[in-house]
Amino acid sequence: MKTITIKLPKPEADKLDNFVKTKNYPSKSEFIRNLLRDKIEESQKEKQGWLALAEKSLEKIWNNKKDAETWDKYL
């Protein structure tokens, strides 16, 4: 596992310590790893959502009956 270092202002570091203790995380590192995994997964799902939305929007263009009739004349 690779080690990284982050610096937090004291109030934020104290909040992190308190949160980790109250939520019974094994460590601050484990909490931050989970947070990063969740954020990356959320970003990937959002990207997939946008791609699905774009595909659905383009269906109207792709499934245009008039275009199909025109292409059939030339293909």
Image (cartoon, rainbow, N blue to C red):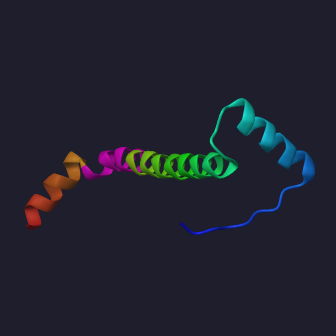
Residue furthest to the right in view is 10
State left or right for residue 23 relative to residue 10: left
Residue at 66 percent across and 33 percent down: it is 24
Task: Indicate whether 46 appears above or below 3.
Answer: above
Residue at 82 percent across and 62 percent down: it is 7
Of residues 68 and 29, which is closer to you in this image? Answer: 29
User: In the image, which residues are magenta?
Assistant: 53-62
Specify the quadrant of the image occupied by residue 18: top right
Q: How many marks?
A: 0
Tell whether position 56 is magenta. yes
Q: Position of residue 3 (x, y in %)?
A: 63, 68
Task: Indicate whether 49 appears above or below 74.
Answer: above
Q: Position of residue 31 (x, y in %)?
A: 64, 45
Q: Position of residue 13 (x, y in %)?
A: 84, 49
Tell whether position 49 is magenta. no
Q: Main secondary structure of the magenta part?
A: helix
Of residues 68 and 31, which is closer to you in this image? Answer: 31
Q: Position of residue 41 (x, y in %)?
A: 49, 49
Specify the quadrant of the image occupied by residue 26: top right
Residue at 8 percent across and 67 percent down: it is 75
Of residues 53 and 6, which is closer to you in this image? Answer: 6
